[in-house]
Image (spheres, helix red, strand yellow):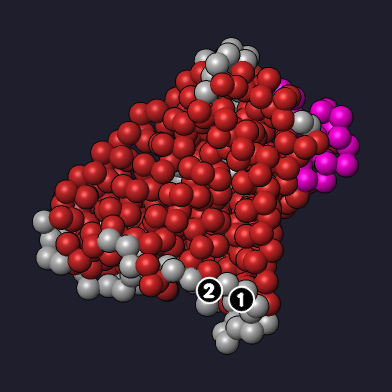
């Protein structure tokens, strides 16, 4: 497998996995989820989920990946549990669904880069028209999917991740500069308060399941992406320290994005619940205040680097279904890539049309007990992100603990980390994978489905 043979060093794996994790989830989705879900209380719940529930799942995915060197479907088969390959298939479907709408948003980010280059700061207030200029944003989406497919087909992800090593720190520096700048603006403190001072009365069950979906989405977990990437990890590498690095990088970048956004939102007098448009509406106006030259430089760089961060994520999302049909159905890699990319682009078209352009897809479905309809794009997100990913996390931990057996997991993680079993982290992961993750994630999954799609709220 060309793509997967590219890495031998530990840093290669961490860079690839961090590249997968860091993307629109951190910079676009995290701030608007925080904004819609009451601020700091959401942030706290999100952090707890990342470290307590997601981290053990991440270790498990990487361990299964290193052990089997396969795609999610093949991995369960290789371990000798053919029926469990259905779980791999569920992951692949999640990946296809996620990439279908992710690519639409990546197209927006790329389009905003072009707008910034031409100094069109007014685009912020024209976001609604921008996303409904269907042929243009459709073309950007097509370009983005094409670039993703090109990278996956040429097996040049290695090169992309090398570039990411320079570009991601640049993005972080720009965001930190914007944090500093935002603090000098009027009302900045109100934004910081909203982001960091929890108001526990804002916690309701939807806040909890949104935080859970966000944690899995941001860390690229629950669909087997890290099973596929786990084959990058060398036999003597320490899975735990890699997983710690990936988690800290991902959570850290999301945290900075929030710290940047809320002072800006408050200083511009905008509403925190701007939804998916939050960064697209807020940022151009901020760049404008930097003056024409600096505004264009910082604005274009920001959206260019954001597009780039999205690209290392779309590559990982496409890689999983491609690896599956190459390994399991013997289709040539090059054909597989373009076929899967085309299918996913088509699956994404209703999402593209569901932000006002087509009434059918904009008001696609009304959940039982809901008073307003949900768009096609949101439906896909609710199913794939908030339901399938946590379910995948629940089942993969159950699988590792009771089917594959905990001893095998511990043995795999202990390679490159001989003290794992007796370390505090080892004991915690043992407990989490055996009890906490399967039970808590299972319960949360059921409650999420009941609450979201059927309007039945057992708690909150
Ligand atoms: N984590 C990425 C982001 O935050 C998105 C992503 C890439 C993803 N690969 C994934 C999400 C696998 C879930 C599963 O932008």
Residue 440, horizontal then vertical, whole percent: 62, 53
Task: Please report the residue visible at 52 percent of the width from the left and 23 percent of the height from the top.
Answer: 423
Image vertical order of residue 427 relative to residue 336, above or below: above
**Mark 2 neighbour class, 10 Å CA radius: few under 14, some 14 to 19, many 20 or more:** few
Residue 40 visible: yes
Name the residue carrying label 2.
460
What's the residue at 22%, 73% (across, down)?
A: 269
Q: Looking at the picture, how far across and down is residue 243, in whole percent?
A: 51, 31
| Numbered mark located on residue 234 in the image | none
User: Which of the 4 image quadrants contains residue 230?
Assistant: top right
Which residue is identified by label 1? 457
State left or right for residue 264 relative to residue 408: left
Q: Foreground residue, 440 or 254?
A: 440
Above or below for 416 versus 335: above
Residue at image position (52%, 77%) is 356
Query: Does the magenta stretch mainly form a helix, a strand or a loop?
Result: helix
Q: Is label 1 in a helix, a strand or a loop?
A: loop
Drawn side of residue 130 relative to residue 443, left or right: left
Dot 2: element:
loop
Q: What stretch of residues is rendered in magenta? A: 66-88
Is ligand 1 closer than 8 angstroms to the Cβ of mark 1? Answer: no
Q: Quadrant of the N terminus?
A: top right
**Image spot of residue 427 (x, y percent):** 57, 30
- Rounded to the nearest whole Å, what is the CA distance between mark 1 and mark 2? 7 Å
Q: Quadrant of residue 316?
A: top right
Q: Are marks 1 and 2 in contact (CB under 8 Å)?
A: yes
Residue 207 among those drawn in magenta:
no
Q: Does the image show residue 92?
A: no
**Image position of 245 (left or right of 187):** right
């Amino acid at each position: 497998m060309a793509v997967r043979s590219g890495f031998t060093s530990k840093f290669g794996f961490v860079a690839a996995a961090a590249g997968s994790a860091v993307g629109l989830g951190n910079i676009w989705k995290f701030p608007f989820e925080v904004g819609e879900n009451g601020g700091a209380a959401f942030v706290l719940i999100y952090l707890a989920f990342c470290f307590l529930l997601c981290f053990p799942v991440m270790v498990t995915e990487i361990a299964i990946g290193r052990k089997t060197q396969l795609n999610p479907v093949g991995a369960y088969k290789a371990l000798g549990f053919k029926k469990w390959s259905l779980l791999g298939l569920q992951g692949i479907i999640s990946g296809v669904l996620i990439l279908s709408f992710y690519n639409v948003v990546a197209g927006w980010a790329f389009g905003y880069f072009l707008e910034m280059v031409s100094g069109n700061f007014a685009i912020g207030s024209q976001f609604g028209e921008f996303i409904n200029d269907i042929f243009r944003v459709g073309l950007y989406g097509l370009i983005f999917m094409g670039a993703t497919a090109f990278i996956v087909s040429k097996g040049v992800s290695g090169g992309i991740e090398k570039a990411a090593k320079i570009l991601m720190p640049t993005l972080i520096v720009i965001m930190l500069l914007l944090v500093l700048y935002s603090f000098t603006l009027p009302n900045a403190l109100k934004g910081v308060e909203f982001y960091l001072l929890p108001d526990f009365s804002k916690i309701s069950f939807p806040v909890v399941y949104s935080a859970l979906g966000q944690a899995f989405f941001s860390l690229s977990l629950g669909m087997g992406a890290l099973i596929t990437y786990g084959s990058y990890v060398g036999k003597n590498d320490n899975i735990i320290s890699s997983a710690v690095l990936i988690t800290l990088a991902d959570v850290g970048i999301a945290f900075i994005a929030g710290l940047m956004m809320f002072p800006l939102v408050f200083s511009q007098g905008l509403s925190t619940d701007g939804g998916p448009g939050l960064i697209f509406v807020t940022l151009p106006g901020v760049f404008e205040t930097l003056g024409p030259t600096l505004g264009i430089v910082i604005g274009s760089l920001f959206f260019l680097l954001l597009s780039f961060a999205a690209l290392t994520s779309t590559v990982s999302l496409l890689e999983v279904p491609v690896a599956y049909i190459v390994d399991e159905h013997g289709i040539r890699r090059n054909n597989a890539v373009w076929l899967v990319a085309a299918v996913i682009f088509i699956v994404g078209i209703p999402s593209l049309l569901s932000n006002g352009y087509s009434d059918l897809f904009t008001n696609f479905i009304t959940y039982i007990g809901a008073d307003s309809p949900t768009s096609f794009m949101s439906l896909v997100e609710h199913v794939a992100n908030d339901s399938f990913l946590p379910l995948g996390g629940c089942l993969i931990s159950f699988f590792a603990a009771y089917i594959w057996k905990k001893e095998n997991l511990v043995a795999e993680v202990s390679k490159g980390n001989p003290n794992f079993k007796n370390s505090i982290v080892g004991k915690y992961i043992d407990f989490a994978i055996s009890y906490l993750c399967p039970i808590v994630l299972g319960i949360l999954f059921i409650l999420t489905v009941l609450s979201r799609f059927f309007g039945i709220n057992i708690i909150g």
